[in-house]
Image (cartoon, helix red, strand yellow):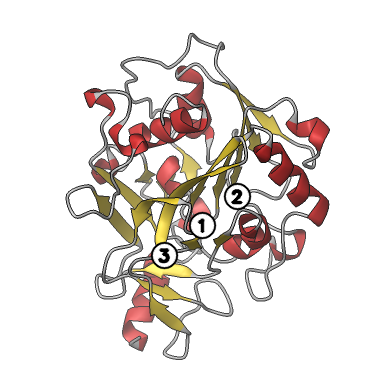
Amino acid sequence: MRRSAALVLVCLLAPGTTLAQQVADSSYSPPIAAPAYETGAGPTVLIDETHHNFHTAGGRYLTFANLLRRDGYVVEPSSEAFTRETLATADILVISNALAEENVEDWSLPTHSAFDSAEIVAVREWVAGGGALMLIADHMPMPGAAVELAAAFGVHFSDGFALDIERRTGTITFRRSDGSLVDHAIVDGRNADERVDSVVTFAGQAFRVVAQAEPLMVVPAGITLLMPVEAWQFSEETPHLSAEGMLQGAVLHHGEGRVALFGEAAMFSAQLGGEERLPMGMNEPTAAQNYQFLLNVVHWLSGLLD
């Protein structure tokens, strides 16, 4: 990678500029033509806030939580370690950008697991018994924090950054028309009004899955997976490989339960970033169908889509 491109990426995307100033866009409220459930009558969704999560129900995932509530779901924050007992109250568990305590202030290698072995066993057994997990891990160091949990379901997260070096952006558009957004019940929705033709992500990782998983978002050509020692610090020596054909979204069945995995988190948020309060996430004009994609994913986790 050319040093000039690396420097431009740092300037455009580094935490010291836009990312550190992200706030939820509380005004974002897209239409839901046919809510899945009556208000408060749907399944219970727990959003993890125990593991130093970058996205929480009251923070950067405020619009995520509110969208699901408007669709009839009961959404609650989860502030306890994962055990059989704490998971028993949930129908769907959302984990987004968890971090180990060691990496909260230090976004450099080594990255540590955000979950201990007992929690991983508890989540795996809960899913096998019929629970539904939505596991989201963005760019480094978040994939490293979730790599052991993802591996429990046969998925290999990459602790790096999936970026378009030539276009000097982290934005990736997945389209039904070119096959990068894969034909699936989640993409089709329950009816023609819920059909999704494109999904936009905003810099994340890329991952690989076991054969029985169902791809949703296949990384197109031109995307590079960079594996730096420290987040956002790129140079000509940074290890990298083509991310083409890897995934940023997939689903799988595990026992009686379901798992949805994503390699980017902002796609399911609606945020305002930087001093200019620029939209990023579902509120970004080019990502107009992201919110419906999120609803469709949760509908699939709920068993409303097959």
Instruction: Look at discs 2 and 3 and give the one toward the viewer.
Output: 2
Residue 288 x %, y %:
27, 38
Instruction: Tell me the distance, in whole angstroms, between the alpha carbons under discs 2 and 1.
Output: 10 Å
- For disc 2, the marked residue is 54
The amino acid marked with disc number 1 is: Asp
Asked whether the residues under the numbered discs 2 and 3 touch, taking CB atoms below 8 Å apart as contact, a structural biologist would say no
**Tag 1 residue:** 138
| Residue type beneath disc 2 | Phe
Q: Which residue is at the front of the view, 34 or 22?
A: 34
Image quadrant of residue 94?
top right
Quarter the N terminus occupies: bottom left
Which disc number belongs to residue 13?
A: 3
Characterize the local packing of mark 1: few (<14), some (14-19) or many (20 or more) Cα atoms within 10 angstroms.
many
**Residue 125 vs residue 161: left or right?**
right
Residue at the spot 32% in from the left edge and 24% down from the top edge: 190
Whether residue 63 is visible to the viewer of this picture, yes or no, is yes
Q: Position of residue 71 (x, y in %)?
A: 45, 19
Q: Earlier in the sequence, mark 2 or mark 3?
A: 3
Q: Nearer the viewer, residue 201 or 221?
A: 221
Q: Are marks 2 and 1 in contact (CB under 8 Å)?
A: yes
